[in-house]
Amino acid sequence: MSDLGELYQEVIFDHYRRPRNRGVLAGANRKAAGYNPLCGDKVTLYLKVEDGVVKDVSFEGTGCAIATASASLMTEALKGKTEAEAQALFGRFHEMVTASSAVPQAEMGKLSVLSGVREFPARVKCATLAWHTLQAALHGEDRTVSTEE
Ligand code: ZN
C-alpha cells in the first residue's frame, strides 16, 4: 500500500471508512454473494435492474480496505449503466488491475485509484471480488462466488 499515491490512498481509505451504498437494497431483483478465502473478504451485492439498466445497487459485507473500497466505488460507478456497460466496465477494471498495459485514467474515473493493486498480486482478488460478484448477479446466479474457484 505504501507505493500507492497519497491521493489514491486517501480515496481508498475514505471509501473503507464510509462505504457508499452499503446495506440491503429494497426492491432489489438481482443478488449474489462473493467470498475471497485468501483474505477473508465477503460481499453480498444487490441490484435493481429495470429495462436493462442498473437503477440502483448496494452491497453488504466485511473485508479489508481494498475489498470494501472497491465494492463502494463499484456501486457508485454502476448506477445508471446498462447491463452491457456494466459488463464492459468489469472487463476494463479487470484489465486495469491485472494487465501490464495501463488503462487510461480518464476512462476509469474514480476507479483508477485502485490501479495500484496491480503491483500487489495478493490484493488483486480483494479488488476484483465485488466485480466477480457483479458478474454473477448480472447473470442471475444467486450463489456464492469464490475467488478460488
Ligand atoms: Zn482483502
Image (tube, rainbow, N blue to C red):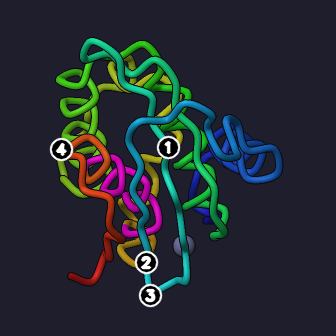
Assign a secondary structure to mark 2: strand
Asked whether disc 3 touches disc 2, contact meaning CB atoms under 8 Å apart, the reply is yes
Disc sitting over residue 38 in the figure: 3
Mark 2 or mark 4: which comes first in sequence? 2
Report how far apart the C-alphas of labels 3 and 2 lie in the structure: 6 Å
Report how far apart the C-alphas of labels 3 and 4 lie in the structure: 26 Å
Report the residue at 31% width, 70% height from top.
145
Answer whether residue 127 is magenta in the image. Answer: yes
Residue 13 at what x, y percent from top left?
A: 75, 51
Disc sitting over residue 46 in the figure: 1
Q: Quadrant of the N terminus?
A: bottom right
Bounds of the magenta segment = 125-135
Name which residue type carries label 1.
Tyr
Assign a secondary structure to mark 4: loop
Whether the residue under disc 4 has CB within 8 Å of ligand 1: no
Report the residue at 19% width, 30% height from top.
88
Disc sitting over residue 141 in the figure: none
Magenta: main secondary structure equals helix
